[in-house]
Image: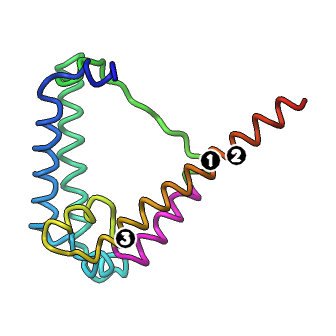
């Protein structure tokens, strides 16, 4: 657990405050309601586009300014850096599967947690499905890695 010890003492409280702001904003904008998300996905309500755009704008400006004036992240002390994910088959297939689940349930992960805060208890089914789906993918990936290792060892 050495990694957690290297963090600034305010790391967890700042993340908590960020989560509170995120959840409050999602609830205030109405994006915690599955019907609002489904209306967006059916091109009937573009409110979600403005909420996502606002979030992207604030994040983009913050990162641009932070990386210009600071060399290290304030709470971790680590240098700023970008982790680029290449566009590969897994990104494409994973995005399609994520989109299908989002469209069927009307629940996006961030909004799902915030939705609990406004009393949407049935969203627990979607959250349970998200956890099971992520677990199934991790299990599948570890099985593929084990199979690849056993094939490489046999050679």
Residue at 39% across, 30% down: 82
Q: Contact (CB < 8 A) between labels 1 and 3?
A: no
What residue lies at 83% left-to-right and 29% top-to-bottom? 153
* 81 or 130: nearer the viewer: 130
Which residue is denoted by mark 1 in the rendering? 141
| Residue 133 percent across, percent down from the top left | 50, 61
Whether the magenta-drawn stretch holds residue 69 is answered as no
Q: Which mark is residue 63?
A: none
| Residue 126 disc label | 3
Q: Are marks 2 and 1 in contact (CB under 8 Å)?
A: yes
Q: Is residue 146 left or right of residue 140?
A: right
Q: Is residue 44 above or below residue 10?
A: below
- SS for dot 2: helix
Magenta segment boundaries in residue numbering: 92-106
> Would you place residue 129 above or below residue 4 in this image?
below
Q: Residues within 10 Å of mark 1 (few under 14, many from 20)?
A: few
What scheme was used to colour the molecule?
Answer: rainbow
Please name the residue shown 50% across and 59% down the image: 95
Q: Secondary structure at mark 3?
A: helix
Pinpoint residue 39: horizontal percent, then vertical percent. Answer: 30, 81
Q: Is residue 95 magenta?
A: yes
- The residue that disc 2 covers is 144
Tell me the crowding category of disc 2: few under 14, some 14 to 19, or many 20 or more residues within 10 angstroms, Cα based. few
């Amino acid at each position: 657990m050495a990694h957690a010890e290297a963090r600034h003492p305010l790391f967890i409280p700042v993340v908590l405050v960020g989560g509170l702001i995120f959840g409050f904003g999602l609830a205030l904008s109405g994006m915690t309601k599955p019907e609002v998300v489904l209306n967006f996905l059916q091109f009937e309500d573009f409110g979600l586009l403005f909420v996502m755009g606002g979030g992207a704008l604030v994040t983009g400006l913050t990162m641009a300014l932070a990386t210009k004036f600071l060399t290290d992240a304030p709470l971790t002390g680590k240098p700023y850096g970008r982790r680029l994910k290449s566009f590969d088959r897994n990104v494409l297939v994973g995005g399609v599967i994520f989109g299908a689940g989002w469209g069927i349930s009307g629940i996006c992960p961030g909004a799902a947690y915030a939705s609990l805060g406004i009393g949407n208890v049935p969203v627990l089914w979607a959250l349970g499905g998200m956890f099971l789906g992520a677990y199934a993918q991790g299990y599948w990936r570890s099985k593929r890695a084990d199979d690849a290792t056993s094939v490489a060892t046999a050679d």
